[in-house]
Image (cartoon, rainbow, N blue to C red):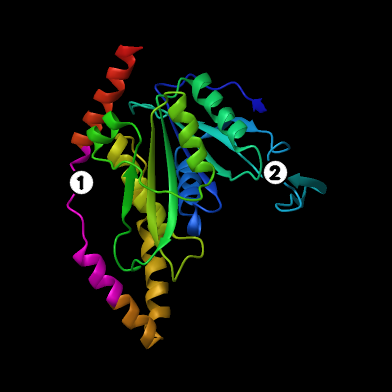
Amino acid sequence: MLWRHEPPGLRRPILVVGFEGWFDVAKGATGALDWLADQVEADEVAAIDPEPYFDFTARRPTVRLEAGQRVIDWPANAVRAAVLGDEGHDLLLLAGTEPHLRWRTFSEDLVEVARATSAELVITLGSMAEAVPHTRAPQVKGSSTNPALAARLGLSSPTYQGPTGIVGVLHDTLDRERIPVISLRVAVPHYVSGPPNPKAMRSLLQHLQHVTGVATNWVGLNEPADDWQRQVDGAVSQDSEASAYVDQLERQADAALQDDLPSGEDLAAEFERFLQERRDED
């Protein structure tokens, strides 16, 4: 199912994935991954054949002209690799499209990528619409079903029950294969959920760096995030009911403000200790 390109020699890679669809409001997750891939000059190393996994009447391929030739673009799930030089880990990045069919087999394809590249950890990124104000820093929640990893990094254990998406199936598959996996998800204001949302992208990348110690250059999104907020501020100020609603959300957000996370250095040290202990066990 994989079209392979020879991967470069990767150093203790981390596989970070996000999928367009139910778990990608405002394209917070895939937007963050695409932006990061450009920053680190990631190159494609593998792609999952879309044929077995998509209903093309529901998600139609598109046709474009390139140098006078017609080119068909299919729903993509390509894995890109970035060699980061001085960083302790290299990255594998997948900003993909949630498939329609055969989710278990699709997840097994991603396990194959993780095994073939000796990925030490998988991190899924997501964005969900919630009753949060656009004026506050977007809150990122992290969870893991691995008790040791959750305890080390101060993550919660998943408590959600109900319909799930490809991310839920992927987590289950990775758990069964004993590959550590973390979920990071950002809250997006439900009243402004159209893409792009650089403020949500920035928060996800900032948290990814905070947890892993791998530089994501999230500060490069400061200007786009500020521009986005100014635009939303302008729209909200024109509607008294919207302004009152945002004021209410601000009060709720401030009252529920969580304690500061441990320092990035402390989290990164715990992260590395966890991975070292797994290597020692193997």
Above or below, 80 relative to 73: above
In terms of sequence position, does the residue under pointer 1 or pointer 2 come before the other?
A: 2
Position of 13 with respect to 132 (left or right) is right
Identify the residue under disc 2.
Answer: 54
Name which residue lies at 50% across and 55% down.
27
The C terminus appears in which quarter of the rendering?
top left
Is 47 or 38 nearer to us in this picture?
A: 47
The N terminus appears in which quarter of the rendering?
top right
Q: Amino acid at mark 1?
A: Leu
Residue 231 is situated, as x and y percent measured from the top left of the image, at 42, 73
Q: Nearer the viewer, mark 1 or mark 2?
A: 2
Circle 1 residues within 10 Å: few <14, some 14–19, many ≥20:
few
Position of 136 with respect to 223 (left or right) is left
Labels 1 and 2 touching (C-beta < 8 A) = no
Position of 282 with respect to 32 (left or right) is left
Instruction: Identify the element where label 2 is drawn.
Output: loop
What residue range appears in magenta?
248-264
Q: Quadrant of residue 121?
A: top left
Identify the residue under disc 1.
Answer: 261
Residue 31 is situated, as x and y percent measured from the top left of the image, at 49, 51
Distance between mark 1 and mark 2 Cα atoms: 40 Å
Instruction: Identify the element where label 1 is drawn.
Output: loop
Quick check: can you spot residue 54? Answer: yes
